[in-house]
C-alpha cells in the first residue's frame, strides 16, 4: 500500500499554542456547564417559553450533526455504492463524525430542563411514544455508539504495537473480531443518519403556524437529508485542505474532485425540489395569507436569498471538471456547501420561527461561549486522535516536526 493511501499517526507535539487556547475555552465551557446544571438554564442563557431551544438545538445539534455528516456521505459512496477508491477519506471523516455527534449529544444532555431524568431514554417501558424527539434521540445516541465502534480499529491497531505484551495480545485478538463485525456496523452507520437527519427536518413540519412559508414544507425530511449530504461532502473537502495547510498532509485532488461531482448533482436535486415546492405552495391562498401575516418581508427575504446564493454558488465549480481540479476553487465550493447547509438549518429552526407576540430572543455571551467551547472540544479531541492513531492517509514523513 502506498504512502498516499496508508493510514498513519500524524505525530508531532500535542500541547501547541493553539491546543492550549482550546484547553482554556474548554475550561470556560466546563464552568458554564456547572452553572447551568446547578443554577438552571436561566443562569447562562436567554432561552424562554417562546424560544425554548435558543441557539442550542439549531447550532449545537442540527448544524454540528450536519457538519459531522462527512462520515455518512463518504460511507454511502464507499460502501453502499462500492466505490472503494474513496476509502482513504473514510477514517478521517468517521473520526470527525464521531466527535460532531458526541458534541451534539452532549449539548442535548446539558440543555435538558430536567437533565436528571435522562435515564428514561434508556428504559423503554416509560418511553413517551407520542414524542417527536424520541426517535431522534435514540437514533443519535445509537449512531454515536456506531461511529465510535468504527473509530476503535485505529486504536487497536496502535495498541498492537504496545510495549505491554498483554495489551498488545488483547488488541491482536480483538481486532479480527471487530473487523468481521464491521459490515454490520457500517450498515447501521448508513441507516441511522438517514432516519434521524430526515426526522430533524420534519420536526418543523408540525409548526405550520409558527414557521415562515419560505421554510415550512412537507418536503423537509428530504430537504434536510439532501442538505446533510452536501454539508458532509463540503466538510470532507474543507477538512482535507485544513489538514494539508496545518500539517502538510498530502491531498488527493483528483479523488476530491470526483467525489465533489456527486455533491453537485445532489445540490441540483435539492434546489429543484426546494424551489418547485415553494412555487407550488404559494399557489395556495392560505400560504400567501400566512406569509402576509408574518410580515417583515425584507428580513425573511434577505436570509432566504442569501441561503439560495450559498447553495447555488458552488454549482459553477462542482459541475465543471476544470474548476473542480483547481484546489482553491474546490475549497471555496466546500466552504459554501457548509455555509449554505448551516444557514438553511439555522433559518429553519430559528430565523423563520415566530412564536406568539411578545417573545424576543438573542443569545447571551455565555450561550455563545458554550458553543465555542463545545466546538473546541471537538477540534482538540480530533487533533489528539489523528496525532496518536492511524487515522489520516497521505501523512508526510516530516509531519511530526510541524
Image (cartoon, grey):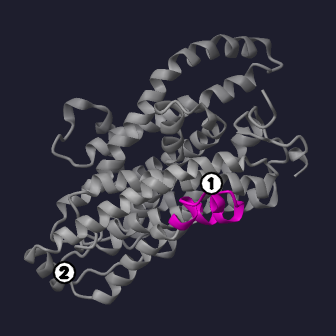
Closer to us: 302 or 382: 302
The main secondary structure of the magenta stretch is helix
Position of residue 252 relative to residue 77, above or below, is: below
Tell how many labels: 2
Q: Is residue 216 visible?
A: no
Q: Is residue 220 left or right of residue 376?
A: left
Quarter of the image for the N terminus: give it: top right
Query: What's the residue at 63%, 17% (across, down)?
Result: 175
Labelled disc at residue 237: 1
- On screen, 251 above or below 212? above
Residue 348 on image: x %, y %? 33, 67
- Residue range (magenta): 315-334
Residue 63 seen by the camera: yes
Q: Is residue 369 magenta?
A: no
Decide: few, some or many residues near mark 2? Use Cα within 10 Å; few <14, some 14-19, many ≥20.
some
Q: Residue at x 60, y 50 (%)?
A: 236
Q: Which residue is mark 2?
A: 291
x and y percent of residue 177 in the render? Answer: 57, 13
Amino acid at each position: 500500500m502506498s504512502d498516499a493511501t496508508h493510514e498513519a499517526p500524524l505525530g508531532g507535539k500535542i500541547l501547541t499554542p493553539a491546543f492550549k487556547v482550546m484547553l482554556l475555552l474548554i475550561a470556560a465551557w466546563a464552568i458554564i456547564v456547572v452553572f447551568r446544571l446547578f443554577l438552571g438554564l436561566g443562569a447562562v442563557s436567554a432561552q424562554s417559553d417562546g424560544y425554548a431551544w435558543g441557539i442550542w438545538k439549531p447550532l449545537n445539534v442540527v448544524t454540528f450533526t450536519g457538519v459531522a455528516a462527512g462520515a455518512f456521505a463518504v460511507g454511502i459512496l464507499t460502501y453502499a455504492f462500492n466505490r472503494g477508491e474513496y476509502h482513504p477519506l473514510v477514517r478521517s471523516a468517521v473520526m470527525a463524525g464521531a466527535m460532531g455527534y458526541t458534541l451534539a449529544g452532549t449539548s442535548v444532555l446539558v440543555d435538558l430542563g430536567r437533565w436528571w431524568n435522562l435515564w428514561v431514554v434508556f428504559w423503554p417501558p416509560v418511553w413517551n411514544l407520542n414524542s417527536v424527539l424520541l426517535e431522534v434521540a435514540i437514533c443519535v445516541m445509537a449512531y454515536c455508539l456506531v461511529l465510535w465502534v468504527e473509530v476503535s480499529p485505529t486504536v487497536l491497531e496502535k495498541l498492537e504495537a504496545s510495549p505491554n505484551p498483554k495489551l498488545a495480545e488483547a488488541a491482536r485478538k480483538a481486532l479480527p473480531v471487530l473487523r468481521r463485525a464491521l459490515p454490520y456496523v457500517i450498515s447501521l452507520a448508513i441507516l441511522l443518519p438517514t432516519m434521524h437527519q430526515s426526522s430533524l427536518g420534519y420536526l418543523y413540519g408540525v409548526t405550520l403556524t409558527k414557521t415562515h412559508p419560505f421554510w415550512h414544507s412537507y418536503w423537509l425530511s428530504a430537504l434536510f437529508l439532501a442538505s446533510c449530504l452536501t454539508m458532509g461532502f463540503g466538510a470532507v473537502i474543507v477538512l482535507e485542505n485544513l489538514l494539508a495547510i496545518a500539517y502538510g498532509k498530502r491531498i488527493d485532488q483528483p479523488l476530491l474532485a470526483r467525489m465533489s461531482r456527486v455533491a453537485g448533482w445532489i445540490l441540483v436535486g435539492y434546489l429543484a425540489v426546494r424551489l418547485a415546492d415553494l412555487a407550488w405552495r404559494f399557489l395556495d391562498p392560505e400560504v400567501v395569507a400566512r406569509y402576509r401575516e408574518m410580515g417583515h418581508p425584507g428580513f425573511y427575504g434577505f436570509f432566504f436569498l442569501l441561503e439560495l446564493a450559498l447553495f447555488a454558488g458552488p454549482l459553477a465549480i462542482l459541475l465543471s471538471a476544470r474548476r473542480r481540479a483547481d484546489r482553491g476553487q474546490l475549497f471555496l465550493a466546500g466552504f459554501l456547501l457548509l455555509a449554505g447547509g448551516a444557514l438553511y438549518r439555522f433559518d429553519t429552526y430559528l430565523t423563520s420561527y415566530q412564536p406568539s407576540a411578545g417573545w424576543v430572543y438573542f443569545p447571551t455571551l455565555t450561550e455563545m461561549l458554550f458553543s465555542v467551547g463545545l466546538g473546541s472540544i471537538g477540534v482538540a479531541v480530533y487533533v489528539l486522535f489523528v496525532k496518536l492513531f492511524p487515522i489520516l492517509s497521505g501523512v508526510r514523513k516530516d509531519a511530526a516536526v510541524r
